[in-house]
Image: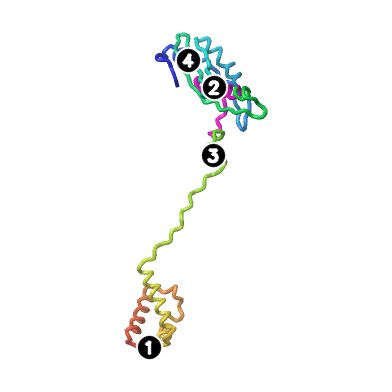
Amino acid sequence: MYRSENISDLLSALVKTKLILSSPVRNKKAHNYKYAPLEEILRVVEEPLLENGLVISHDRDVEQNFLVTYLYHTSGQFISTKIRIEYKAESKLNFMQSLGSASTYAMRYNITALLNLAAEDDDDGVSSGDKKEYKKTAKEPVEPVVEQEETQESKERREIIAQAKEIALQHPKLKEELNKQFNGKPQKEYTYNDILILRTLLKKYLTEEVSLD
């Protein structure tokens, strides 16, 4: 915001203006929201401003594509704001028509900014490109499935059972003793004591305490 060195008189007049200022009627529609056109904004603000020694003026810089809007007080004090004018000549509009349309748009935004007026529906940033999802319930984050690291005990259990199975295929005596000891019990149901017994049997056969023939 640009301003004069001293704005105390202007601020005092602006406070008095705000006390009697009403909101402009949003009687125009664009896209998915309603807004107050420039003529409606001026209808609401000009008389209260003049009653308190305030007036609005615009300065359009076509070369730099800016429109500066000033709020002057009779004391000579002022505040101002500016906005870039975005326009292009389309098939239905010549250069001056495009410039005029963009300038009207810029005036509307500058005035509402200076006077802190709500002149259009709040679309939560959708029109500016900040798109958001609506009417969707946020889903709880799904916890990733993490495989548990194999413990030393489960690793030894797996290795002992695999080793017993392999040796039993080659040596009938061990196979017979295993069948006698566990009576066809599924290996996945082996208890801790079963594993100890199995380990003892393997040790006996692997150290050749028992003939493998």
For disc 2, the marked residue is: 62
Disc 4 residue type (three-letter): Leu
Disc 1 residue type (three-letter): Leu
Image marks 3 and 4: residues in contact by CB distance under 8 Å:
no
Position of 178 with respect to 94 (left or right) is left
As drawn, the residue found furthest toward the right would be 92
For disc 1, the marked residue is: 212
Looking at this view, is 163 or 108 the one in front?
108
- Cα separation, mark 2 vs mark 4, equals 30 Å
Label 4 residue SS:
helix
Label 3 residue SS:
loop
Which of the 4 quarters of the picture holds residue 208? bottom left
Which of the 4 quarters of the picture holds residue 88? top right
Tag shown at residue 19: none
Q: Residues within 10 Å of mark 4 (few under 14, many from 20)?
A: some
**Which is nearer the N-term, disc 1 or disc 4?**
4
Q: Measuring 46% from the left and 17% from the top, which residue is drawn there? A: 79
